[in-house]
Image (spheres, rainbow, N blue to C red):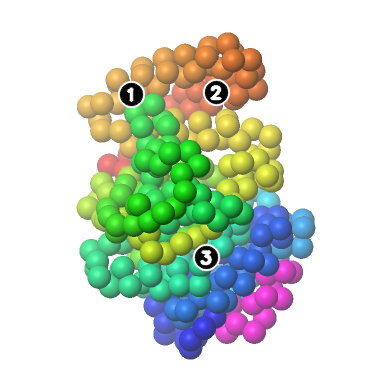
Amino acid sequence: MCGPVSQQAEVAVLLVSHDGASWLTAVLAGLKAQTAPVGSVVAVDTGSRDGSPDLIENALAGVPAATVRRVPASTSFPQAVSEGLAALAQAGHEPEWLWILHDDANPAPDALAHLLAASAAHPEADILGPKLREWPSLRRLLELGVTISGTGRRETGLERGEYDQGQHDDVREVLAVNTAGMLIRRRALEELGGFDEELPMFGNDLDLGWRAAATGRTALIVPQAVVFHAEAAHRGVRRTPLTGRHTHFQERRAALFLLLANSPRAALPFQVVRLALGSVLRVLGLLCARAVGEALDELAALISVYRHPGKVRAARRSRA
């Protein structure tokens, strides 16, 4: 990493990996090329079988204050982040900021510098996110902040395949930012209780942003910071023990759960009925389109959430 590396630096990098060898060489090169210094690097590998942890250890061998943790493949993303925080605490590091990277998210060399510059210009912000562009196309936009519709649709405000021409380059407040490249105050993450473990793979970014907003915290999108994201899990490029063959099921279950967990109390009865009816209609529509697998995933997601109301109640109590 360019610039001095000091344990007193304000930023710690937390890299989460699982069978990411196809992308990690570029990602680690991007990390080491950052123009802003970081104080420490923690990589948490969740049971990779493709040599990812060895690749990370070799790449970070000359980086001071770098730690690689190997945890079981059943470890969820929220648990991996908690593991990284624990590793920082054990090493005596208390950075102001935590920069979260996925193993398929390659940051531009000045990504962290732009995020930190925005944090200095907007001291009220606790969460900042970069512009995400598609990898390997590099020019197509993926996300500049994200929200969720009342039916559980992830909304980016972008057209499918929209090219980046600087048309969305204003720093602005958003509900949530993707965890790929998220810069978050360590204390804010800890005070929010981390990412919700009921959302092991998908939706935990939206849930965190919603909870942060409910406590008066601000999330910003910083388009000058760019991260290229392959979205390997979402696109089914790789399978994990947490998704298997049913990515659509996991995404829909996450959407239903986080809406029920975070909706205002007065709107909850309506939301319960709306989501149930909407899911049934989606099942019928998918069957008509002969997308039987997705229809079954949709139905399974509805049943998975609605048959365990205690989990939703517990989530709502923790947010009260």
Which quadrant is home to the N terminus?
A: bottom right
Secondary element type, mark 2:
helix
**Of the residues under marks 2 and 3, which one precedes in the sequence?**
3
Q: Which mark is residue 241?
A: none
Q: Amino acid at mark 3?
A: Pro
Magenta span includes 56: yes
Q: Relative to residue 189, is residue 18 drawn left or right? A: right
Instruction: Say which of marks 2 and 1 sits in front.
Output: 2
At a point 47% along the width and 54% down the height, the residue shown is 132
Magenta span includes 105: no
Q: Amino acid at mark 1?
A: Gln
Counting other residues with Cα less than 10 Å from the Cα at mark 2, is it few (<14), some (14-19), or many (20 or more)?
A: many
Residue 103 placement (x, y as % from top left):
61, 59
Counting other residues with Cα less than 10 Å from the Cα at mark 3, is it few (<14), some (14-19), or many (20 or more)?
A: many
Q: Quadrant of residue 30?
A: bottom right
Disc 1 designates what residue?
Answer: 271
Disc 3 designates what residue?
Answer: 107
- Which of these two is toward me, 251 or 32? 32
Q: Is residue 264 above or below residue 211?
A: above
The reply to whether dot 2 and dot 1 touch (C-beta < 8 Å) is no
Q: Relative to residue 193, is residue 16 drawn left or right? A: right
At a point 42% along the width and 59% down the height, the residue shown is 130
Q: Amino acid at mark 2?
A: Glu
Disc 2 designates what residue?
Answer: 298
At a point 44% along the width and 78% down the height, the residue shown is 36
Range of the magenta residues?
A: 54-66
Which quadrant is home to the C terminus?
A: top left
Q: CA distance from mark 2 to mark 3?
A: 34 Å
Q: Quadrant of residue 247?
A: top right
Secondary element type, mark 3:
strand
Q: CA distance from mark 3 to mark 1?
A: 38 Å
Residue 45 placement (x, y as % from top left):
65, 61
